Amino acid sequence: LKGIDPEKYDLLENYQVSQKQLLKKCIEVEKRDKKISSMNKLVTQLKNITTKQKDIEEEQVKVINQSQVIKEKNDKIKALTFEINMNETYMSSYQAEISRLKE
């Protein structure tokens, strides 16, 4: 064909070169698509991790707040226990005074 019809041969050769170039570009596009897909998966995973971290931080704040409430209630319990002990001491003292006065 090269010697018989050089124009057709050149066209055929250009066509084959174009097909090879197109194939290379298609392979490049496919690789890029896979890379983009992989990156999108990573972005989604990072978003999920970030969401979980926010949830964990919120839970930590709740735990800190609950710890503060528990500390305050424990302090109140200690104060009330002290008050009860004082009242029991006064009551014992009054009962002793009443017993002494009855005698």
Image (cartoon, rainbow, N blue to C red):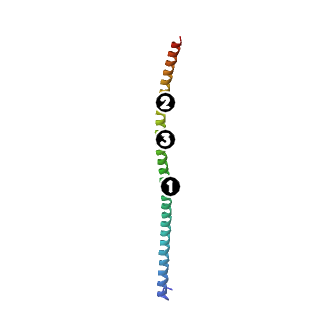
Amino acid marked by disc 2: Leu
Amino acid marked by disc 3: Gln
> Mark 1 vs mark 3: which is more N-terminal?
1
> Mark 2 vs mark 3: which is more N-terminal?
3
Residue identified by numbered label 1: 48
Disc number placed over residue 80 in the picture, else none:
2
Horizontal and vertical percent for residue 5? 49, 88
Task: Please say if 47 is above or below 101.
Answer: below
Horizontal and vertical percent for residue 28? 47, 69
Confirm or deny contact between disc 1 and disc 2 (CB under 8 A): no
Task: Please say if 12 is above or below 39.
Answer: below
Amino acid marked by disc 1: Asn
Task: Please say if 45 is above or below 81.
Answer: below
Closest to the observer, 32 or 75? 75
Horizontal and vertical percent for residue 93? 49, 18
| Residue at figure coordinates x 49%, y 46% from the top left | 59
| Residue at figure coordinates x 47%, y 39% from the top left | 69
| Residue at figure coordinates x 50%, y 58% from the top left | 44
Disc number placed over residue 21 in the picture, else none:
none
Disc number placed over residue 66 in the picture, else none:
3
Instruction: Say which element carries label 2.
Output: helix
Closest to the observer, 95 or 1? 95
Q: Residues within 10 Å of mark 1 (few under 14, many from 20)?
A: few
In the displayed orientation, state which residue is furthest to the top.
Answer: 103
Q: Nearer the viewer, mark 1 or mark 3?
A: 3
| Residue at figure coordinates x 51%, y 21% from the top left | 91
